[in-house]
């Protein structure tokens, strides 16, 4: 039996699909080349390290948690809340004379509480993830305001535990510890999604939860694990933030939220089936960090930086969705 060769339309569809998957890396290369030509400071090694540590590491950790949640078809608006409450608990522990291990334990426990509550609301009571995590976001903001007498920062510069300081500013084999932590957690998250039964079940839940449930997938358990893992990753981000600035500023973790959502959806463009994935998410976070850093160095203020980020997201996602829709027609 002879098999007909694909026609021109099919070949164009294949070419367009490939073009979409390389669009995000191509945009990154173009932006880097433009800023490198425009600013000598941008292409310096010190600036690269600054971008990776200060503009990428913390948002990337929150984005890893968001990647897990979006893989199950949900959304987690409380990623900043988990980070903030972890930093708050650790800061209060340090100010009361607690050591580094106790502070880290308290911070992770606070973040874990956020994840457990989200799990109960979403997996236990069946509340829509958007509504459940939005409620936790509001409650978390109020808790922070109440704990700090209306939003006063907590400074922990004096008697700051050396282990916490090393966590943010130390290095191993000349590699900053925050980057090592990010690499390890990124590898574990990717392994979890790509190579484990949990990852297969999470993707199945995200694609068709009813079908997954009827196929024997423990959807509720998968959702519960996902929200707990997301909050735990965000808790690590909050602890690193506290260790970096040696102070706690209420609601500062909310800055991670929009970047996490944007990075995850930008990252889906490099996937063949448009699914959330760790490499794509990290590339999205890096793109945001490089863009903001480059615009700052060429003289753009914060507000215009946000405009540029928004336009970038619209263009990349708009082209990606448009091409994929055309390929399905």
Image: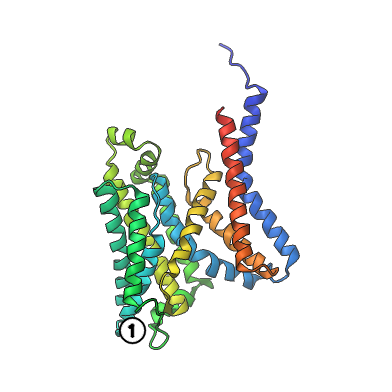
- How packed mark 1 is, by other alpha carbons closer than 10 Å (few <14, some 14-19, many 20 or more), is some
**On screen, 113 above or below 24?**
below
- Residue pushed farthest right? 37
- Mark yes or no: residue 251 visible: yes
Q: In the rendering, at what x and y percent does residue 56 appear?
A: 53, 64
Percent position of residue 47, x then y: 63, 71
Question: Which quarter shows the N terminus?
Answer: top right
Q: How many marks?
A: 1
Would you say 204 lies left or right of 317 here? left
> Quadrant of residue 38 in the image?
bottom right
Q: Nearer the viewer, residue 37 or 208?
A: 208
Question: Which residue is labeled 1 in the image?
Answer: 95
- Residue drawn at the location 29% of the way across and 67% of the way down: 109
Locate the C terminus and report the quarter of the image it occupies: top right
Look at the numbered disc 1 and give the secondary structure of its residue: helix
Residue at image position (48%, 51%) is 278
């Amino acid at each position: 039996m002879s098999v007909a060769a694909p026609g021109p339309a099919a070949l164009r569809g294949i070419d367009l699909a490939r073009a979409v998957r390389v669009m995000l890396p191509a945009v990154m290369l173009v932006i880097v080349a433009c800023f490198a030509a425009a600013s000598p400071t941008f292409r310096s090694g010190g600036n690269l390290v600054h971008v990776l540590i200060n503009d990428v590491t913390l948002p990337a950790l929150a984005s890893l948690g968001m990647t897990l949640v979006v893989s199950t078809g949900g959304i987690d608006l409380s990623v900043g809340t988990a980070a903030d409450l972890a930093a708050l608990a650790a800061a209060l522990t340090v100010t009361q004379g607690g050591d580094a291990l106790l502070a880290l334990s308290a911070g992770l426990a606070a973040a874990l509480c956020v994840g457990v509550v989200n799990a109960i609301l979403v997996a236990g009571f069946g509340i829509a993830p958007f509504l459940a995590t939005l409620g936790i976001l509001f409650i978390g903001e109020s808790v922070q305001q109440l704990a700090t007498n209306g939003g006063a920062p907590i400074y922990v510069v004096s008697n700051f535990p050396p282990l916490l300081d090393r966590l943010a500013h130390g290095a191993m084999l000349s590699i900053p510890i925050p980057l090592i932590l990010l690499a390890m957690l990124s590898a574990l998250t990717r392994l979890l999604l790509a190579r484990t039964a949990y990852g297969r079940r999470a993707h199945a839940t995200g694609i068709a939860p009813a079908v997954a449930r009827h196929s024997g997938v423990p959807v509720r358990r998968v959702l519960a694990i996902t929200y707990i893992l997301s909050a735990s990753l965000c808790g690590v981000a909050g602890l690193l933030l506290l260790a970096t600035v040696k102070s706690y500023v209420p609601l500062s973790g909310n800055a991670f939220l929009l970047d996490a959502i944007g990075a995850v959806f930008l990252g889906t463009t490099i996937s063949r089936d448009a699914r959330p994935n760790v490499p794509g998410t990290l590339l999205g976070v890096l793109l945001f960090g490089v863009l903001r850093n480059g615009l700052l160095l060429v003289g753009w203020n914060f507000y215009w930086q946000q405009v540029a980020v928004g336009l970038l997201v619209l263009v990349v996602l708009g082209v990606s969705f448009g091409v994929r829709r055309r390929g399905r027609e």
